[in-house]
Amino acid sequence: MNVDVKKVLVVSAHPEPRSLNGALTNFAVGHLRAAGHEVRVSDLYAMKWKATVDAGDFPSGEAYEGGSGGVAAGARPRLRVMAASEEATLAGRLTPDVAAEQEKVRWADAVVLQFPLWWFSAPAILKGWIDRVFTAGFAYGPAVPPPYSEGVLAGRRALISVTVGARETSFSDRGIHGQLADVLHPLQHGLFWFTGMAPLAPFAVYGANELPEERFAAARREYGARLDGLFTEDPVPFRSLVGGDYDHDMRLLEGVEEPGVSGLGLHRGVGRGVRRAGRGAAPVS
Amino acid sequence: MNVDVKKVLVVSAHPEPRSLNGALTNFAVGHLRAAGHEVRVSDLYAMKWKATVDAGDFPSGEAYEGGSGGVAAGARPRLRVMAASEEATLAGRLTPDVAAEQEKVRWADAVVLQFPLWWFSAPAILKGWIDRVFTAGFAYGPAVPPPYSEGVLAGRRALISVTVGARETSFSDRGIHGQLADVLHPLQHGLFWFTGMAPLAPFAVYGANELPEERFAAARREYGARLDGLFTEDPVPFRSLVGGDYDHDMRLLEGVEEPGVSGLGLHRGVGRGVRRAGRGAAPVS
């Protein structure tokens, strides 16, 4: 096989293994392995992943209010989440479940998130994977490079595979729920791009509450094609913080965007696949 | 006291009671009670709220694949979350923790969510409160009115009070993280407005990792003023699904928006406070 062998982490978040999400996870693992890639899976429900950040995540307790010795005898120190998170990360004192997931993310050339869209975002168990794994000191903070394109996880690709109960029109560019790219902005731009990972356009299966076999077959074909392009497809052309588009207060400079673009689309530039042709500029959505 | 007495539910999601979020929760409760309102609090960490939707949430198990009797003896039925959620809701068989929170939401004239912005969205424990409490049959689905403005929770108001580590400029209209209103779209439009609740503009404390006393005092003053306006302030003027702005595929009709508006701003119309003045239209962001 002449493919470039890559490492892929698939993170899956559905309580029912025999669900559409379970089937898409299994399909992705099989498809990627058949193409010669190494695949690891974090099946969050099967792992009984702890969703909630709490003091138990930072057992050392040094970076709480006042630091060690700064707290009156007998008083429970005050938890400062970001400081405690960073201290535990840099000291290698994270809990084993979190440390194992960080190792998987570091190992991976690409991360795939598989989940059902619940209330227009990730299920709580997946949000808890993000909240707990992407600690200060690992994914952001003074000890790692600045965010957006130069982030500590740069060099990796990221793909959301999401199932959506509603129809596609309602998530189109004028759809009432908001364009899917905008609804997923907190993950696409806020998690992936912030940490340096290059996100691809999301893969979505709409009308997912009832999916007849022929539509499921079509979805597998489409998903297979997207997985085939995981390392070759052009990522979403989000702008770089350091590329000259933003001022020192992290605001986009006036006039950088294509005419008529506002909202979150401001932060998507013109990608390789849709270069400006002469003077007629092609806005990318 | 001549205020109109209202009922307010404050939902708080921070692991440390002595955090800024804990302080803002306490401030809101005291301020609202001093104004004569009834207040109930759901302190999710103190309640040890279960964040994760799983089969244990739907103990009856009737609405799983095949319904009762449709599954081979000994085989565990396949969980279909939306169907199981709706069946348990309509049959009054939800778990007591979820039923109690639904009763609080129904009781309330306004819901306030207090949380730190983690990865550009709510902490997992709060997402889990949403995932588990806003069941099919309670907040959406064929058994309740259609979503957006006419939703089943119409008549209620909703306010997000969020603490943000970053500076305000980075969440401004041209800020790299995205305008806060857009980043919070899944909650403001996707949870509140979808279920009929009228969301106010979010209240945010920026630069929240280090907050000197004078900035905390200013934040309390500003938050107090927002709470004073909880039942009088103009809500975000999101568009109604049935108001004639959308087609039958739930897409915004062409030309309805103000010139130059794209992205999620399409779904915000012109509010009472910013009516068009003559022919010169004032876009609302």
Image (cartoon, coloured by chain):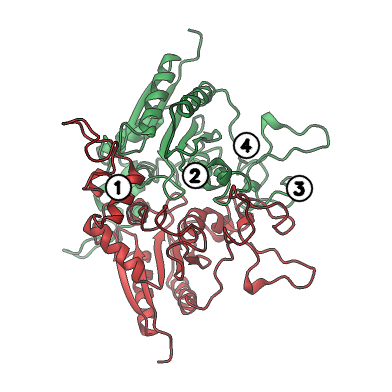
Chain colours: A red, B green
Q: Residue under mark 2: which chain is it in?
A: B
Asked whether the residues under marks 4 and 1 belong to the same chain, the reply is no
Rendered location of residue B71, percent (x, y)? 24, 63
In three-dimensional space, the C-alpha distance between marks 4 and 1, rounded to whole angstroms, equals: 34 Å
State the residue position of label 4.
B237
The amino acid pointed to by label 4 is Pro
In three-dimensional space, the C-alpha distance between marks 4 and 3, rounded to whole angstroms, equals: 17 Å
Rendered location of residue B105, percent (x, y)? 39, 32
State the residue position of label 1.
A52
Rendered location of residue B35, percent (x, y)? 45, 15
Could you say whether the residue bearing mark 4 is in a helix, strand or loop?
A: loop
Is residue B151 positioned above or below B216 on the image?
Answer: below
The amino acid pointed to by label 1 is Thr
In three-dimensional space, the C-alpha distance between marks 2 and 1, rounded to whole angstroms, equals: 22 Å
Could you say whether the residue bearing mark 3 is in a helix, strand or loop?
A: loop
**Res B259 label:** 3
Mark 4 or mark 1, whichever is nearer to me: 1
